[in-house]
Amino acid sequence: MRPRDSKILHDVRGAYGRVAVMTIAIAVAVMGFGAILIAKEVITSDAQAAYAATNPAAATIDVASGVDEQLLADVRQIDGVLDAAARQTVSTTVQLDGEWIPLRVFVVDPSDSRTIAAFADPDEVWPAGTGGVVLERAAASLLGVRAGDTLTVASATGEEAALSVDGAVWDAALAPATRERTGYAFATPQTVAALGFPVLADQLLITVDDGRGSQSRNPDRVDEVAATIATRLQQMGSEVHGVTAPPYRHPHQNQTDTVTNLLLGFAIAALALAGVLVASTLGGMLAGQAREIAIMKTVGATTGAVARLYLGMVAAIAIVATGVALPGAIAGGLGLARLVGGLLNIDIVATGATPGTTAVVILSGVLVPVVVAMVPVLRAAGLSVREALGGLSISAASRLSQLLGRVGGGNRLPVFALRNLARRPRRLASTVALLALGGSLFLAGLNSAAAWEGWVDDGLSRRSYDAQLTLSEPMAAADAAAALGGVDGIASWEGLLSLPAVPAGERGDVVIERVYPDGGHGTFLATALDPQTEYLDLAVRDGRWLRADDTDAVVLNQSAATRLDDPTVGSTVHLSVEGSLVTARVVGVVNEVGGGANAYFPSGALDDVVGISDTLNGVRLVASAPLADVTQRAEDALGSVVSVVPTAELRSAIDQHVVVFIAVLIALAIVMAVIGALGLASAMTISVMERTREFGVMKATGARPGTIRLLVVLEGLATGAFGLAVALVLSVPASALVGSTLGRLAFNLPLPLVITAGPIGVWALVAVLGAALASLSAAQRGARLTVLESLAHQ
């Protein structure tokens, strides 16, 4: 063995504790970084593959007059059309645990080849028989049913009807039913007719040719072809109400990508902190080996040779740590991917990381510590023989240390502790940084969770009703009043008219909307209601709310304003509502939690669209009896109710979108906290070793072991306190960043900045206990040495 190799092995054996700390820190950081990176790669690739396998429609054209075989044949001849199909979607409700939730039934004719918007049918349960449905598998899980069971659904007249469950299929293009709390089913036209709904294929699904016989994914190309078809159909006399062309990706993919990018950023920070810990620990080791470095240089070692020697040691430690962490990173990444895949209704088929991702994890785990460690290594290797023989001493006190030395008082021990910390300001700064970043991320995660909860509470408190019922067709307000007047348990109610809308040009030109087939993601509603409503009190962001004397006014919520390119108050907007052009003046913009894009009009503003005055298709009610009983009686009285949404259920639907990501964020914070604790333990151990002779002098002059032990523990507690203080400061921008990301993803609104006392108290306790435990081992070592052992230390 070469002398240099022998020396390194000797150094490793002599400092096995510090080597273990470096190894653990790198391994923990690599595991967190690798898990997030692998999960992101797996989720992105598997979700996209599953979505593409359904061959989703590039665009869907809403043809109110219906699509027949001849029209399909004509559309297939239009330049740029690869394929076309006709479908229908029926909205109704299904009973779940005594309550009614929305059910979207996708009507597919048995003769449909399903080359567009396909679903996986491994058990070959399609087509469903008359009177039966095939559920999307996530909906089957939500409803708690399987093949052979019976569903209770609402018929076209609102009466209860029984449908048999013929099996389950998988449609990866749909958002998970469990997260949206909406059932998805596939049925034949015969079943829909048996429920009393009109059978009319009013959806034209198309795929677009990319010019090479394959489906185009270029949105500009899709929009061009879809607009051409819509214009052609209008010229042929068909009634076109809108065109939708959703992005070619899973409905929740954008949210997942954004949040995993945020988590990946914090994981990279954890990896960088591990590198800082390595550099700090190595700096302490080099301080003890300054004379050895001088001897090596005396016998001919160059600066480069000394640097390579110690950097090689760091690289070897990093390789071992990365090798230990890699299996855990892969397992953690796949586990996280499966968890998120379940939330996306996606099967994760990957069994490991790709070679490219594995290489990135390995290179990051090895190179980051080596690059960061170059600072102390080059500093030590660059010393002259004379400087090295003098040792990398800590005797030269910093100005802060000198200042603290002048502090008087009875008990000098706390002053000594602070002065000792100030003797190595760089080491103190790196240790505090480790603790502070872990604490700030921990506080950001919990603060964001608290902000989310308060935000949702405030948003729901602005809805002063217990449930909203949506009708399949508008009805006269007088008829609704007569029907609900005899329903026991309704304390009060109000009607509203809510219709699907799309932004339009001044002449009613066709505008392509990015709405998904599930009917929830990307929807835009135009809602007419009493301007003096007591059931909705949204926070006004700009302008004002509706007034009773408004005629052509509209108030937009933040999502609607974004979809309309953020019009200013006083400007004019144009919407296509059920095929009719509606023009209105913007009088205000409001913030709304728990809803999609919504444009609010005064009562009667949309009557011309439906052709009947004083109508409604929605009812908001306040119950004075058990809500489930009241809504059931209200449904029976009104008939043809297609959905019942209790206000309380909005919370679970909203929370499902972020709960996993906040949990992962806090888990990453714990990883960083572990690295910080290891950094503190390493710093205290190095400090004790460097001051061994000093402790011997203290003992020789009467200091007791307990005094030395207390001194070291106080140093650790002071470091933890500094880390806590910096963490509190850093947690403010970190909480703002995380809150803004989560809020904008959910409802295009940043979360309010919330700093809560609870998380601060928890982290303060963790910081104090962690600092005490991290410094205890070093304190025990310093107190255990005898005077002779201390003075003999080299």
Image: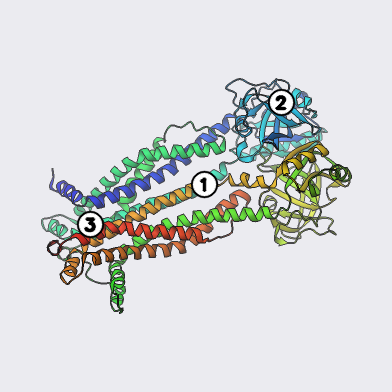
Residue 163: image tag: 2
Residue 261 position, x and y percent, is 49, 47
Residue occupying the point 25% across, 72% down: 397
**Residues under labels 2 and 3: Cα distance?**
74 Å
> Quadrant where the C terminus lies?
bottom left
Inspect this view and state whether residue 328 appears.
Answer: yes
Residue 687 position, x and y percent, is 25, 62
Circle 2 SS class: strand
Looking at the image, residue 710 sits to the left or right of residue 291; the answer is right
Who comes first in sequence, dot 2 or dot 1? 2
Inspect this view and state whether residue 505 appears.
Answer: no
Q: Answer yes or no: do the residues labelled 2 and 3 have beta carbons within 8 Å?
A: no
Circle 1 SS class: helix
Residue 661: image tag: 1
Residue 23: image tag: none
Residue occupying the point 20% across, 69% down: 703
Residue density around tag 3, few if under 14, some if 14–19, many if 20 or more, within 10 Å: some
- Judged from this view, the residue extending furthest toward the left is 299
Q: Which residue is mark 3?
A: 285
Q: Amino acid at mark 3?
A: Met
Circle 3 SS class: helix
Q: Is residue 10 above or below residue 779?
A: above
Who comes first in sequence, dot 3 or dot 1? 3
Residue occupying the point 78% across, 29% down: 200
Residue density around tag 1, few if under 14, some if 14–19, many if 20 or more, within 10 Å: some
Q: Amino acid at mark 2?
A: Leu
Who comes first in sequence, dot 2 or dot 3? 2
Q: Is residue 9 above or below residue 773?
A: above
Count numbered badges in the picture.
3
Between marks 2 and 3 in the image, the one whose residue lies nearer the viewer? 2
Q: Amino acid at mark 1?
A: Phe
Residue density around tag 2, few if under 14, some if 14–19, many if 20 or more, within 10 Å: many
